[in-house]
Image: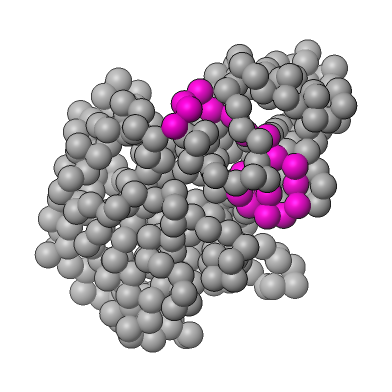
Amino acid sequence: MVRGLVVTAQGQIAVKELAKTKELPPRHVRVQTLNSVASVGTELGMIRGRRQGTCPGEARLGYSAVGVVTESAAEGFQTGQRVAVYGAPYVWHCSELLVPATLAVPVPDNVTNPSAATVGLGAIALHALRSAGTELGHEVVIMGLGILGTILARLAAAAGCFVYASDPLKERRGRVQDPRIRTCHPGELPELVLDQTKGHGADTVFLVMGTADTETLEEAVDLARLRGTVSVVSDAQAQLPRALLFKKETRLIVPQAGGPGRYDEIYEREARDYPYSEVRWTEGRNMESYIRLLAQGFLTVDDLLPEAVPLEEAPSSYAHLEQGGGGELTVVFRY
């Protein structure tokens, strides 16, 4: 039997036992999961939505993991190979996964399992930076320092940006631990950004909060320079502040998760890649790039990750995160 984590229609977290899928589709790999990492904002939103009756039905939780190939029907993957995998519905908090080859990348020996399991978060962060046109020397604001926001802040700093990041929780701000990133309480952010940019504002503001309302979106536009960019990486339930956007001619974008290929059945379910020369940064190539950055020391995330817990401890782990997490940014499951 296979064990997987779901949220029920009533908002309860449960470990389900499922029959093992016998047939492996073409261009897929069967993966025995070692670790998976929670995307806290997304998953808590799914849980709350069902408790509040705004999201119907049962749903699988999670989308980012690492494991070992136990069967391969894809060129370039062998039994026993360690791979990082990403992308619902193929990847979730489950002991065994059937993953399209376009959503799996090899993991070098010097990258730990928990770090590799953040590959989905890393791909999302990289695509957010690329789609915003972030360049060396840009002034970048990160609003929200959960696990995704912190990875995004570190990647922006590694790319040579000047980074200013805010979160209301002191414990989260303390987890950044990177001298290249200036952190503050959200109430102090406008003064910090205006001071550091000589009154111009940021080139790009990334909203990376669990949810973002109209007021938060307006704050982000205020922080951006004239003709700057606001990237909504989080789940925003907001009305567009048209007058403010018009006044500053702000570019507003909502990046599509890990990059081109996401939600395309030909790319994902059929595992047919786009031509390299035509689509340089697919979600799969963003995954590969992220793992290489970890392997070559441009980025570290092990210090952001708590000790792994069994899947059966999920209800208490999510409850702890709902109450602020005591500074923890995510939960890592082991199988």
Q: Position of residue 333 (x, y in %)?
A: 27, 54
Q: Nearer the viewer, residue 85 or 293?
A: 293
**Residue at point 38%, 60% (across, down):** 114
Residue drawn at 80 percent across, 24 percent down: 195
**Residue 254 at x, y = what percent?**
63, 38
207 above or below 179?
above
Q: Quadrant of the C terminus?
A: bottom left
Q: Residue at x 33, y 78 (%)?
A: 69
State the count of labels. Answer: 0
Q: Tell me which residue sits at (85%, 17%) in the image.
A: 247
Horizontal side of 275 relative to 233 (left or right) equals right
Between residue 214 and residue 177, name the one nearer to us.
177
- Whether residue 233 appears in magenta in the rendering, the answer is no
**Whether residue 189 is situated above or below residue 118 in the rendered picture:** above
Residue 214 appears at what percent x and percent y?
60, 16
Looking at the picture, the colour scheme in use is: one colour
Quarter of the figure with the N terminus: bottom left
> Relative to 63, is 12 above or below?
above
Q: Quadrant of residue 82?
A: bottom left
Reply yes or no: does residue 155 show up in magenta: yes
Magenta span: 153-171
Depth order, front residue of 20/38: 38
Q: Residue 50, position in %: x, y?
A: 29, 28
Q: Quadrant of residue 202?
A: top right
Between residues 10 and 212, which one lies in front from this camera angle? 212
Residue 323 located left or right of residue 273: left
Residue 86 visible somewhere in the drawing = no
User: Can residue 61 be seen in this snapshot?
Assistant: yes
